[in-house]
Image (cartoon, grey):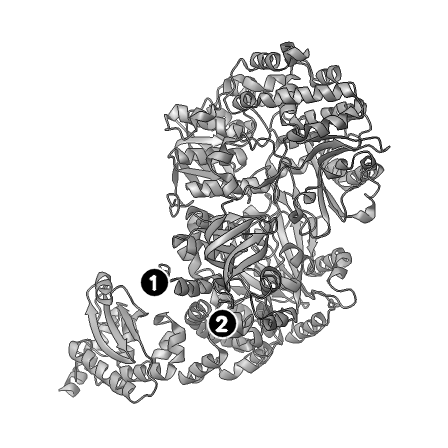
């Protein structure tokens, strides 16, 4: 229990150094320590968790998740069980009504419920189309049945045959529904449009797909809608206290294992000696040795070009790193609102559940508006306001002072560099008001009197805060050539790098952004294999 | 979450975490329950303005470094805490362009004071030397032990003939104000103003009778203001890590709704979400008395008469609070007074303009009457001067603090909500008068944090009282927070008070927890491994 | 007239303290072990450079029951049964000055020259008693100083010479 205590961060040498205390870094560190390596995590910020953070950015007592919102992988995430995270602070709620879309004209909403309440989901969709409702239910059931396979694919380093595997999976799961394997190579939009006739449902599914990170209209990538989006949709959990509670539980697990954590310490260099990663140098000059390995949770370009240095890489690797792209997928703006009362939607007269939805899409009257929105954001233009919104205080009263509510949203925005700092400043000053006007159209009580304060975090700020390049929380575009065994590029897709002892463990590696900790978990597998570590993994899990 | 522990500690402020870590190191199974999403209580560092600017929302000054036993016992340094003791600790800048600076180097402090009065400089040297000598004995022993009574203390002091041995210590100090003390020993108004200001920043108002008693001790550590690199929250992480590495658990967002009591004994707690946790050995509360006794304890657990007194305001709270402005800046202040004393530009904490104790006294009167003083004289701290990690490269954080009422006359605390930006701007203007380079261009962003915001963020700072109990003679030692609770035990068996409500007081002293620990160790028969005589 | 820090001297000090305590009413109950640590400071000739003089005393019912000089810190544990209630630690010349009645123990403690560890509240509550014991320690025993008498003044070299010079008249007086 006290193995790490006392040696402390003053120690000059560790077996393993992990750069970045984002959730992937924490996951990797916990497993490394359990496998017997003395391990240090170095974090640039004063807080652990990276994008898994919760703050009180506007008014005291109103908590907002600044990046990661809903949690969909806890049931399959190995670290949750392996380190007993639920005994050491991770507590969740799974709201009944999970995802919905509300409309300004008061049309019926569409509300997707938790899997065991699928009948309610079916009834909601059936208001528009019985066929869509039945197909949705069928897809959801099939997707749920694939859980073990999909989880195994997440928590295993990517095989070069990943795309073919997806075809096989789709064929097996959905083939009899008229959805053969080749659907994997369609775009998500093409699949959604072919399968569902209701524009309202399409709008919600488009939005959910984009949240996953899948570009809507890029061919070759739509299989993700069937395998991942349909699997996770409606399986969303809220962390009591905010998503940062997850980071806290992971950190606590690290502490209990004896991992050392050094915050407010910016790594400015990975020390490379004789072609081997030998440690790190921290801003201010302090050097810490790594006897076995250095793993970087930082983004690809930073890791290779800034920290390790092009002089330690081949021309090919330098070229690949330079060519790696950030955004426009997963570029977010996070608006936060301090409210007296939660939004009361016009659409609630058809289905009151829309007022009790965990995640509510607002500001889009049709599927074409979502399409236009996404095209604008991906195209580098500021879209007309619309958002996915969460009022977490509905489920967790501690997230706002008594009698009030804390709401947070996600806008999809152009990458940070698409606008000038002045333009972003202007966006921060005006965009929320524009969105609030649209929100008010759907929920008339969202008057200025109901909003005590609000604030908008823009991609340029996220880039500064968490070094998410371009504000892209995946630190790398979700595109066919940067996914699966191509992430971040084929030569680097095994978490190993050209530099011996230097590994990638952040979302620039497979499977990318999202709170699954799979990048860290898979990096551990690669490291364990290279170093011949006694594996603390649970074989029965299958991954 | 498991449902049974040996020890449940309510509140993960520095006292709660400290007590928990010691008990975990003693082999007990400990959980700390924190209502907020963050541990640390007042050790809270947030990016209130812009990404990369770390603002200490509450605790900024760590003045018990090298004195508080927990820093050593819990190996805080090995958990990544680094303290910096700024060379130029404090300064006062005055309207006439002069400035006084307090350094870690006593000679330099005396040189600065001598520019106002050579006599005062000599007096200060004598006072400091004497006080610094007994800081070790008195702070180290009286603060870090459960309190005795003022009567016993004065009796002992006279038995030992302390009065006769000291130019500065006297039994009658217990009736005097810091003003009186300063008037007795010092001559120059600006020197007195700075020394009074220093007391005020420590929570000791210069016009309150009796506080002169503690004043020499404050002077004894006037040069021990330390900054926690990377923000005060680093210390919270360190304490938490020590707890976790010794098998304890901290659970955030776990608001305690009630303390379960059976046969007069605390046996566990119930969380706001209904979760029940049992405590095999004890429950310790590090939050305020009001919450612990009025909200958490079930009816009948303590005598109704005691509850009535608490509900009726028996817990004395500081009759003044702090209005803060947190700034993100592109440069550090360059004071006009640097022409007089260049060291002011390197001073960590600067008094912006109080030039006599009368000016302070006048503001105390205004503030206690619920009014914001007409002329604002905030103090300014620039942590980035000594901690390059707290702001992006080339930038700086700033913290302005103005003595202010919690409840405004005509409007109460809520009236702050409309005044925050306005008062904040006036505080910035007050700074700019002395440091003209802090133009709008130099201020990237700023956020006000009013006295009304304090209990909204940290609920146990009742009435914006960041000391968690008035600093006054009537609320000191064995009378703090009330006689029944002063020895860390409560009328409920197995329930202890271990937070800043207790002797000695708020601030990052660790002493309430450390003292509660001794009492608990005695009751539980624990081996006091940490106390090596 | 015993030489300082000899068994005879310790006995004389103990007896003087106990005699003084006997005059007081309300002696505190219980037993306490007090550790005294005197470290070399380059001035006093009675503690060799790099060494410490340590002893333990046990106070029972307000009187000194026994004292023991120790060879090392390990000894302390064996002798005190792992329990020490108070510890007074300071430089040799300060302790010498106390024994010679030249310095005041309360001053030494207040100024931090001699560090006090232990439950100070108890000492404060029994201030009269503590005062009586200290007075006895500092002024009741006529002490001889074979290696020189405090105050030593100045640095090591000068201090050593000064004490040699001072030694002769004291020895004479003692004879």
Mark 1, other Cα within 10 Å: few <14 / some 14–19 / many ≥20:
few
Q: Earlier in the sequence, mark 2 or mark 1?
A: 2
Task: Estimate the x, y position of residue A424 in percent, counting from the top left.
Answer: 73, 37
The quadrant in which residue B101 appears is bottom right
Q: Nearer the viewer, residue A367 or B400?
A: A367
Residue B62 lies, in percent from the top left, at: 52, 59
Q: Secondary structure at mark 2?
A: helix
Q: Secondary structure at mark 1?
A: loop
In the rendered image, the vertical position of residue A383 relative to residue B127, given as above or below: above
Image position of B379 with respect to A344: above or below: below
Q: Nearer the viewer, residue B197 or A60?
A: A60
Mark 2 or 1, closer to the camera: 1
x, y percent for residue A23? 54, 35
What residue is pinned by disc 1? B532
Q: Nearer the viewer, residue B156 or A163?
A: A163
**Residue that appears at 40% across and 24% down:** A529
Q: Is residue A285 visible?
A: no
Q: Which mark is residue B275?
A: none
Please give the chain letter of the residue carrying mark 1. Answer: B
């Amino acid at each position: 229990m006290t193995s790490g205590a006392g040696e402390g961060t003053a120690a000059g040498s560790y077996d393993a150094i992990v750069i970045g205390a984002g959730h992937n870094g924490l996951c990797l560190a916990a497993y490394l320590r359990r496998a017997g390596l003395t391990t240090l995590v170095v974090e640039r910020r004063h807080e652990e968790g990276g994008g898994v953070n919760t703050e009180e950015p506007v008014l005291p007592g109103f908590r907002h998740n600044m990046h990661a919102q809903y949690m969909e992988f806890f049931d399959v995430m190995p670290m949750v069980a392996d380190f007993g995270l639920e005994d050491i602070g991770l507590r969740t709620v799974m709201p009944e009504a999970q995802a919905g879309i509300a409309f300004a004209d008061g049309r019926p909403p569409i509300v997707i419920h938790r899997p065991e309440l699928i009948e309610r989901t079916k009834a909601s969709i059936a208001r528009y189309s019985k066929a869509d409702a039945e197909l949705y239910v069928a897809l959801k059931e099939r997707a749920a049945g694939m859980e073990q396979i999909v989880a195994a694919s997440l928590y295993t380093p990517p095989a070069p045959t990943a795309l073919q595997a997806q075809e096989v999976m789709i064929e097996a799961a959905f083939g009899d529904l008229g959805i053969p394997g080749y659907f994997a190579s369609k775009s998500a939009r093409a699949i959604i449009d072919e399968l569902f006739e209701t524009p309202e449902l399409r709008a919600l599914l488009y939005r959910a797909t984009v949240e996953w990170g899948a570009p809507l209209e890029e061919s070759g990538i739509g299989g993700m809608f069937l395998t991942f989006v349909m699997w996770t949709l409606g399986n969303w959990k809220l962390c009591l206290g905010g998503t940062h509670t997850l980071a806290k539980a992971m950190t606590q697990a690290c502490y209990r294992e004896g991992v050392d954590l050094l915050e407010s310490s910016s790594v400015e260099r990975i020390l490379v000696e004789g072609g081997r990663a030998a440690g790190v140098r921290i801003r201010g000059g302090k050097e810490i040795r790594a006897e076995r390995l250095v793993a970087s949770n930082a983004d690809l370009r930073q890791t290779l070009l800034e920290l390790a240095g092009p002089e330690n890489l081949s021309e090919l690797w330098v070229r690949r790193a330079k060519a790696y792209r950030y955004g426009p997928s997963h570029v977010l703006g996070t608006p936060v609102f301090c409210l007296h009362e939660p939004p009361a939607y016009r659409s609630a007269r058809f289905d009151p559940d829309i007022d009790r939805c965990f995640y509510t899409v607002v500001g889009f009257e049709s599927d074409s508006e979502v399409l236009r929105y996404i095209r604008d954001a991906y195209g580098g233009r500021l879209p007309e306001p619309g958002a996915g919104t969460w009022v977490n205080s509905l489920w967790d009263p501690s997230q706002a002072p008594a009698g009030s509510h804390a709401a947070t949203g996600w806008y999809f925005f152009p990458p940070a560099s698409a606008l000038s700092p002045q333009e972003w400043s202007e966006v921060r000053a005006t965009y929320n008001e524009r969105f609030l006007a649209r929100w008010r159209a759907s929920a008339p009580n969202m008057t200025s009197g109901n909003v005590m304060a609000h604030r908008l975090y823009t991609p340029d700020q996220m880039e500064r805060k968490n070094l998410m390049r371009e504000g892209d929380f995946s630190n790398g575009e979700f595109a066919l050539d940067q996914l699966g065994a191509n992430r971040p590029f084929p030569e680097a897709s095994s978490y190993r790098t050209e530099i011996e002892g230097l590994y990638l463990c952040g979302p620039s590696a497979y499977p990318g952004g999202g709170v699954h900790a799979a990048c860290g978990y898979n990096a551990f597998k690669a490291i364990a294999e290279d170093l011949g570590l006694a594996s603390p993994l649970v074989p029965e899990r299958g991954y | 979450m498991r449902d049974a522990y040996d020890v449940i500690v309510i509140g993960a402020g520095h006292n709660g975490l400290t007590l928990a870590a010691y008990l975990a190191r003693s082999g007990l199974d400990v959980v700390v329950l924190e209502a907020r999403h963050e541990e640390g209580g007042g050790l809270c560092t947030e990016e209130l303005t812009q990404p990369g600017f770390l603002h200490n929302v509450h605790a900024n000054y760590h003045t018990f470094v090298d004195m508080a036993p927990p820093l050593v016992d819990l190996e805080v340094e090995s958990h990544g805490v680094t303290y910096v003791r700024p060379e130029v600790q404090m300064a006062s800048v005055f309207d006439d362009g002069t400035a006084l600076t307090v350094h870690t180097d006593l000679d330099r402090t005396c040189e600065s004071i001598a520019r106002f009065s050579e006599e005062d400089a000599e007096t200060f040297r004598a006072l400091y030397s004497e006080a610094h000598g007994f800081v070790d004995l008195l702070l180290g022993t009286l603060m870090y032990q459960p309190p005795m009574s003022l009567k016993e203390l004065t009796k002992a002091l006279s038995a030992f003939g302390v009065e006769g041995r000291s130019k500065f210590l006297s039994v009658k100090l217990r009736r005097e104000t810091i003003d009186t003390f300063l008037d007795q020993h010092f001559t120059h108004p600006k020197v007195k103003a700075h020394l009074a200001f220093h007391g005020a920043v420590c929570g000791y108002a210069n016009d309150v009778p009796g506080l002169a008693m503690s004043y020499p001790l404050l002077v004894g550590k006037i040069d021990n203001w330390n900054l926690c690199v990377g923000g005060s929250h680093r210390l919270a992480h360190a304490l938490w890590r020590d707890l976790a590495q010794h098998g304890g658990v901290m659970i955030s967002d776990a608001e305690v709704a009630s303390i379960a009591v059976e046969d007069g004994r605390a046996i566990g707690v119930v969380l706001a979400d209904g979760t029940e946790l049992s405590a095999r050995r004890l429950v310790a509360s590090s939050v305020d008395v009001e919450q612990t006794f009025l909200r958490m304890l079930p009816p009948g657990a303590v005598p109704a008469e005691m509850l009535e007194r608490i509900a009726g305001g028996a817990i004395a709270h500081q009759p003044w609070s702090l209005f803060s402005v947190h700034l993100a800046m592109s440069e550090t202040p360059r004071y006009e007074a640097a022409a007089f004393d260049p060291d002011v530009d390197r001073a960590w904490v600067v008094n912006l303009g109080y030039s006599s104790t009368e000016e302070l006294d006048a503001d105390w009167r205004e503030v206690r009457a619920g009014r914001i003083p007409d002329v604002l004289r905030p103090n300014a701290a620039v942590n980035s001067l000594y901690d390059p990690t707290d702001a992006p490269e080339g930038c700086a954080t700033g913290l302005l603090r103005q003595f202010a009422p919690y409840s405004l006359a005509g409007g109460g605390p809520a009236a702050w909500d409309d005044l925050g930006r306005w008062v904040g701007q006036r505080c910035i203007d007050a700074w700019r008068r002395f440091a003209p380079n802090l133009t709008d261009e130099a201020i990237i962003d700023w956020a006000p944090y009013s006295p009304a915001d304090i209990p909204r963020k940290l609920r146990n700072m009742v009435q914006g009282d960041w000391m968690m109990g008035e600093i006054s003679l009537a609320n000191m030692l064995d009378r703090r927070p009330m006689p029944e609770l002063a020895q860390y035990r409560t009328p409920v068996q197995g329930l202890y008070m271990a937070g800043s409500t207790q002797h000695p007081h708020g601030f990052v002293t660790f002493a309430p927890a450390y003292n509660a620990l001794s009492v608990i160790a005695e009751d539980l028969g624990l081996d006091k491994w940490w106390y090596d005589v | 007239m015993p030489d300082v820090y000899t068994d005879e001297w310790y006995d004389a000090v103990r007896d003087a303290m106990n005699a003084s305590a006997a005059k007081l009413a309300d002696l505190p109950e219980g037993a306490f072990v007090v550790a005294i640590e005197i470290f070399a400071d380059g001035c006093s000739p009675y503690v060799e450079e790099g060494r410490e003089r340590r002893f333990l005393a046990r106070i029972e019912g307000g009187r000194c029951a026994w004292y023991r000089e120790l060879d090392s810190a390990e000894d302390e544990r064996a002798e005190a049964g792992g329990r020490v209630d108070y510890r007074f630690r300071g430089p040799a010349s300060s302790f010498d000055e106390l024994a010679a009645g030249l310095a005041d123990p309360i001053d030494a403690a207040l100024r931090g020259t001699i560090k006090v560890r232990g439950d100070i509240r108890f000492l404060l509550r029994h201030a009269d008693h503590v005062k009586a014991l200290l007075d006895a320690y500092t002024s009741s025993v006529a002490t001889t100083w074979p290696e020189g008498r405090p105050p030593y003044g100045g640095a090591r070299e000068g201090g050593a010479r000064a004490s040699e010079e001072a030694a002769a008249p004291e020895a004479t007086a003692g004879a």
